[in-house]
Amino acid sequence: MRRTCSATRPAAASIARPTAICATSVPALTWQAPRRFHLTDYRVFVLDDTALADKLGPLGKATAMKDGRTTIQFSAETDGELLPDGRIRMGKPRAGQFEELE
């Protein structure tokens, strides 16, 4: 599933916030067994700075754009399990694949 989302600052905002655009969102869930699954998530954000990439650590990758903004890719994957009591056990997220951006 792909969707476009955006969060922009209000015109009369008293606190300056960077403009953020989530250009791509591609989550995927693949069943491996009746109670086990693999979850991947890939998102692309366009921001004015690299603070988000710094917080994401190895799950994020920043690329400078010609207009001075930064493209930040988030890519993670993990395995999960549905437990008999209805809870979900998730493994530690690890870095997924990043795409080459122009």
Image (spheres, rainbow, N blue to C red):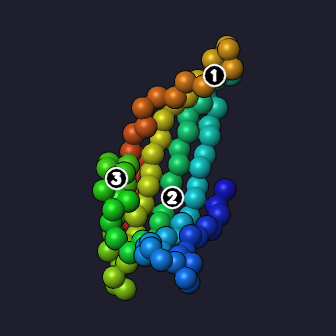
Q: Residue at x 55, y 82 (%)?
A: 12
Q: Nearer the viewer, mark 1 or mark 2?
A: 1
Contact, mark 1 vs mark 2 (Cβ under 8 Å): no
The spot of residue 79 in percent (x, y) is 51, 31
In the picture, measured across the screen, residue 77 lies left or right of residue 50, that is right
The spot of residue 22 in percent (x, y) is 54, 66
Q: Nearer the viewer, residue 87 or 38?
A: 87
Inspect this view and state whether residue 36 appears: no
Inspect this view and state whether residue 68 appears: yes
Q: Residue at x 47, y 41 (%)?
A: 77
Q: Nearer the viewer, mark 3 or mark 2?
A: 3
Tell me the kind of residue under disc 3: Lys
The residue under label 3 is 55
The residue under label 2 is 43
Q: Residues within 10 Å of mark 3 (few under 14, many from 20)?
A: few
Q: Nearer the viewer, residue 54 or 37?
A: 54
In primary-sequence order, the first of circles 1 and 2 is: 2
The spot of residue 84 in percent (x, y) is 67, 13
Q: Residue at x 56, y 84 (%)?
A: 11
Mark 1 → mark 2, Cα distance in angstroms? 26 Å
The residue under label 1 is 87
The numbered dot on residue 71 is none
Vertical comparison of 84 with 19: above or below: above
